[in-house]
Amino acid sequence: MTALPFSHPLLVWPALALALLALALGLRAQLRPGLGVRVVGQRPLLQGLGLALVLAGTGLGLAEPRWGAVEAPRLTVHVVLDASRSMLVADCAGASRWQAALAILDRLWSRPDPGVGFSLDLLTGDSLPLMPPGEDLPLLRDALRAVQPGAQGSPGTGFGYGLAQSAARVEPGEPAVLLLLSDGEETVATRAQAMTRALATLRAAKLPLYAIAFGQPQSLPVPGTALSSTAQPDFLRDLAAGTYGRLLAPGEDPAPLFRNLARGREPLPMARSRVPAHPEWGAWLALAGLGLWLLGAGRTMRAWRPILGLALALGLGQTARADIPLPQSVQAWVAQRALDRDDLVTARHWRPRGDDPLQRLLAAQIDLRAQAFQSALDTLAPLTGQGSPRPLPPWRAPALLMAARALVGLDRRDAALELLERLLLEQPGNLEASHNLQALRRDPVPPPPAPRNPPKPDQGAREDEIEGLRQRLPAKAPPAGAIKDL
């Protein structure tokens, strides 16, 4: 993880070094100009500055600066909930730590946030997966109601082992974070061992951790046992800071944080970021440097200046007279910014209509927010055909998932199931497709219960049936006579 917002930050430093070298050589030539420089009328300092800008712009473009909002907001929050017996301690304003954690998750899952999905793992001595990633928030809340702290998984709390297991289930390159809700008490290993193991795993996976601490840092008895528990929020603070996450303040709502992460307003590791790259800024900087270099080139370039100026004037004049529509990339940027502000009217006005897959995903997302399901299907049609290039492009899975959502909105569940099954064939192990497929499949209808008081058969019909049976049975043979002894 790097603090510089570049796709390839290592290219920035050589470009800056070469730019400084060019500027230094230009300054040296300006202070001690040669005979040829004086005759031609060159200005070495201006030329050195122009060459420095050319080199810096080239490096900047190759490094690809990243900024702005993502075109298709997406984030998966992998919730890791401490389910050990220590969460039963009631030191959270009269409520237990478990109840306080459930209250936060209930508020977080009370309102859906488009583009943000959740999974749920229970943390004990190891990690117990409970729900795969998805956006079915009522199902997540119902799953928590069946959990009793201390009754599932291994005894104790092992952050080093449990977080490593949860991180291993996160897909590489997926925009994702971990949300840990716990009291911070490690019981399986020492704090140093747990910290080392967890940090090594999360840093290798480039997975930031955000934590919420519960409980007071004082020894309190655990209900129903002879044990005591001491909350350790400082352990969670160090663990989150070591992964470039943070410990959320008491009472802080995590929903705005996840919304900003999904939309690129908060930084994610470059390996998991969907913030768009802008290499064109390096090209503009290099062009400005080229212009400065031409200005300082002296008399040899004077003959070219009218030609360059005339070409520039003609180009600007044609641009002013021509009715050129706004580029689709600019429309997509404006629409995405409006969508981030929940301004659906503006987003629909600037909805992109280009053939770029990412622009089609954004247009379909706007249609889904506006409940224009058929328009979303028509937009996604070129991306959801039977054939797909290999390796699977990154837009394929979101396109199929959004098309399935539109089909559900049109009450075409069978077609939505077909798309989800196709996605699982193309990308086996896609957790969101598996979750949505399971949620869409209807449970088999059970047979109707047997009536408590079944109707009695008609007595006349019953007598006729008995009489018929009697007639079909063979006649009873008379008993054999007794033999007298002589």
Image: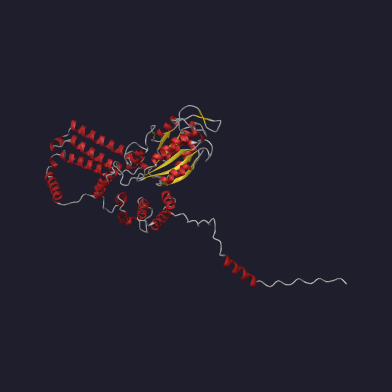
Colouring scheme applied when the structure was drawn: secondary structure
Question: Could you tell me residue 127's position as x and y percent?
Answer: 49, 41
Q: Nearer the viewer, residue 356 or 141?
A: 141
Q: Is residue 146 above or below residue 324?
A: above
Given the current orientation, which residue lies at the most extreme right position?
Answer: 486
Residue at x-position 42% and y-position 42%? 78
Work out which quarter of the rendered image holds the N terminus and state it. top left
- Side (left or right) of 238 relative to 4: right
Q: Nearer the viewer, residue 429 or 173?
A: 429
Any part of residue 263 in sight: yes
Q: Is residue 289 above or below residue 413?
A: above
Q: Nearer the viewer, residue 231 or 39?
A: 231
Question: Could you tell me residue 125's position as x and y percent?
Answer: 52, 37
Question: Could you tell me residue 254's position as x and y percent?
Answer: 37, 37
- Side (left or right) of 342 relative to 443: left
Given the current orientation, which residue lies at the most extreme top position?
Answer: 218
Determine the image quadrant of residue 113. Answer: top left
Question: Could you tell me residue 306's position as x and y percent?
Answer: 11, 45
